[in-house]
Amino acid sequence: MDKVKSPIGRIFIHAALIFFAIYSLVPFFWTTLQSFKTVKDAYARPPKFIFTPTWENYQELWLRSVPENGTQIAIFLIIVVAILIGLMLSANRIPIPNGVIYLFVAFGFVALLWGIPHLVETAKFYDYFINTIIVTVGTVIVSLSIGCLAGYGLARYSGLLAVSVLIAALGFRALPRLAFILPYYQIGNATNTLDTYFLIIITLVAINQPFTIWMLRSFFMEIPKELEEAAMIDGASRLTAFSKVIIPIMWPGIISTGLFSLLLAYNEFLLVRLLAQTTWTLPVAISRFTGGEDPRHLTLAAASAVSATIPIIIVILFFQKNLVKGLASGAVKG
Amino acid sequence: MKRRTFLQFTGPSIIIMTLLMVIPLIMAIWLGMNYITYNNINDPQFVGLQNYIEVLSDPRFWQSFSFTGLYMLIIVPAQLVIGFTIALLLDQVSRFTRGIYLSIYLLPFIIVPVVGTLMFKQLFETSGLFTWLIQTILDTKFRYTEVSVKALIIIQGIWYVTPFALVTYFAGLQTLPVEQVEAASIDGASRWQKIRYIVLPHVSSLTVFILLISLMDAYRVFDNVFVLSEMNPIYKADTIMTYTFRTAITVQRLGKANAMAVITVIGIMIILIPNLIRTYREQVEER
């Protein structure tokens, strides 16, 4: 559309955009403020906007006891994380294959997460955080592996069977989750797998699968057939052509799809709430703070909400382009 | 690609979906015909259609059903209108500013729904920002009543779902045919006429897409309502999903909850089946 030129019109446009930005941000702003208050400040009426910030809510949430050399440990951890992220970002400039560097960085993060409880006494919330990472990473890896195979098959096969699978998947995607999750409880109960990572991951993969195959299929359809046909004429099998020719150029699509799987697994509340008694992920752990009479729940809930949001914001900062592209591709939604 | 190769590639995915979507759905229908609580979970008692009849004659089920309807009726149009308006306005500013606004607007969408709701709730705690604002500006005390909790659920719902419509519309606006807009300008069309006769028809397929997705998502909303309706001791602000959940967990009637889930599945079919048939035709033609 052509641009509005009158100054009053321009002012109105910016005012509306800023108002909507405030509307989007107010809950974040207020919760972050509350999370840095002492219980007394948090309950003050009228609300306090100027106060001495405190880390005590975050400490209570993450740590069982505050170590004496806490500052040194914190600085050390920040340096390690900064080095790992720096390595990841500059992978293209280092004369080592990118894959090796990414593997090293991933290994570094795993070592870090494993090492932290040995450095400081972490509280339950840290365990829930680790659970969330295991469930999320597991779900993303499994759904993308089987989803890529299926998405490719669906994009290249033109029989009625492919259409039927797609339509069935679309139907399943739209159904209320509880219709599956209640039976999952019975399945878990019968196979004695309730409260295990296995059951949570495999059910999340299943719930996620319809969306994954639709989205990956639409990305595979953009890749011309001639590419793998050329490789197959040269004697490669279809699987080799798929893994050596197609997958390397599919990465942007795989990342977009993976991002939606990641959000789905990280956000899942209902399924984990029903299938896990102790292997909670963050949304379930945090929902614990919504009730209760203990006055500390207010500030702890705020701190836990902020803690759970930061990792996702970091991920999105890196991949916002892929997320918007995925949303805009309009095929399906996470 | 041959059928055999297709099955090799798609096999794992089909097996997982059959095992964990088709079979559970059939199980749900059957479990709905049994009397099951956590005490006799391994020894269900067959009661036929009794659970289904009980659900259909349960006033609380219909109450939650009508609140779900109200929720859909408000959320879906609000999301379309606000999303479209903001997308139009966003289209007016420079590329750099857009990026910043878009990042901010996306936040409610990417955040964990439970956490986003919790953050919203913090605003309305006794010492919360909005409680204070309401008291100062309107001079009334904010109380958790059936009406206020329902209003809160709906406002929070709009906050959570609008970014999706916004981004989709915004992407659609980027592909607007420039020549048509210019031709209309030369013919002296007003801005409203251009929006009405060029932009709206251009994004109409997106509108249908957002409409369908948001109808289905609003129908099965759970997390947000669950967190917010905990505040309401009367539990009158239940949607179908939260009521089903309560039946399964609080009341511990697993059989009845399964029956309820099956009935809600049948309910969504009304919107779903025409859409599936349409997509099927499209896909068959595209082949």
Image (cartoon, rainbow, N blue to C red):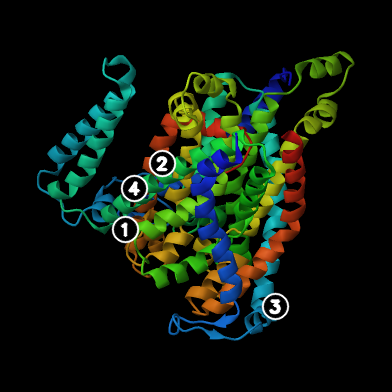
Reading the image, the residue beneath label 4 is A133
- Dot 2 or dot 1: first in sequence order is 1
Q: Mark 2 points at which residue?
A: A312
Of all residues, the one furthest to the right in this rendering is: B187
Q: For numbered disc 3, what is the local secondary structure?
A: helix
Q: Are marks 2 and 1 on the same chain?
A: yes
At which x and y percent is residue B226? Answer: 52, 63
**Is the residue at mark 4 from the same chain as the one at mark 3?**
no
Crowdedness near tag 4: few (<14), some (14–19) or many (≥20) residues, C-alpha within 10 Å: some
> Could you say where residue A145 lies in the image, as x and y percent from the top left?
44, 41
Q: Determine if marks 3 and 1 fall on one subunit.
A: no
State the residue position of label 1.
A39
The amino acid type found where label 4 is placed reads: Ile
Give me the chain letter of mark 3: B
Element class at badge 4: helix
Question: Identity of the amino acid at label 3?
Answer: Leu
Determine whether the residue tagged by mark 2 lies in a helix, strand or loop.
helix
Q: Which residue is drawn at 60% across and 37% down?
A: B2
**Which image quadrant: the N terminus of chain B?**
top right
Mark 2 belongs to which amino acid? Ile
Can residue A63 be seen at all in this image of the molecule? yes
Q: What element carries label 1?
A: helix
Check disc 1 and give the amino acid type: Val
Q: Residue at x 35, y 67 (%)?
A: A277
Q: Is residue B38 found left or right of A294 in the rendered image? A: right
Q: Is residue B145 visible?
A: no
Q: Residue B56 carries which label?
A: 3
Numbered disc total: 4
Mark in front: 3 vs 1: 3
Q: How far apart, in angstroms, are the residues tagged by discs 3 and 1? A: 47 Å
